[in-house]
Image (cartoon, rainbow, N blue to C red):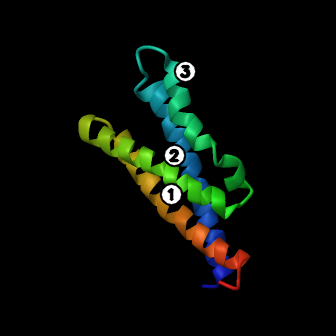
Amino acid sequence: MELTQKANLSYRLSLVLYFCLLASQIAKVLWLHPPQNSIWMIASFTIIPLLLPAYGLIRRKPRASAWLCFILCFYFISGVLDAWFITDSIHGWLITLFSSALFVSAMLFTRWQGQLNNPSR
């Protein structure tokens, strides 16, 4: 596979997984496990960090994808904790799956797009 094709495939996969993770976070906070008090405050703390690199990710910037990988660590931990403590829900497993797959695809996109942008490296 050519480097451009690899970058395009990882970028598309990153976008799909990004929106899946975003939708699952919205579903968790608003419908599946809504908090008792201050639902909008909890929703903003869980959704806004995912929205921070959205502009750069949509504009296909490798730096935004790299920052997304740092942010995903918190969602991975949250998904593992949900899978461990809320055993009757599959949502924790989905967040863990989405965040880890998104981490891999975003990191591959960062690498391959960075190589395309700077061919001298």
Q: Position of residue 21 (x, y in %)?
A: 51, 46
**If you read the primary sequence from the N terminus, does the residue marked by circle 2 or circle 3 appear first?**
2
Would residue 87 be seen by someone viewing this image from the given angle? no
Q: Residue furthest top?
A: 37
- At x 59%, y 47%, the residue is 19
How much space separates mark 1 and mark 3, taking CA atoms? 26 Å
Mark 2 lies on residue: 21
Say what secondary structure mark 1 lies in.
helix
Q: Position of residue 37 (x, y in %)?
A: 44, 14
Q: Residues within 10 Å of mark 1 (few under 14, many from 20)?
A: many
**If you read the primary sequence from the N terminus, does the residue marked by circle 1 or circle 3 appear first?**
3
* Occupied quadrant, residue 23: top right
Query: For this rendering, which residue is in front, 24 or 35?
Result: 35
How much space separates mark 1 and mark 2, taking CA atoms? 9 Å
Mark 1 lies on residue: 102
Q: Position of residue 45 (x, y in %)?
A: 52, 31
Q: Is residue 12 above or below residue 94?
A: below
Which image quarter holds the C terminus?
bottom right
Q: Position of residue 7 (x, y in %)?
A: 64, 72
Mark 3 lies on residue: 40
Q: Is residue 81 above or below residue 60?
A: above
**Dots 1, 2 in contact, CB < 8 A:** yes
The amino acid pointed to by label 3 is Trp
* Occupied quadrant, residue 78: top left
68 relative position to 88: left or right: right
70 relative position to 3: left or right: left
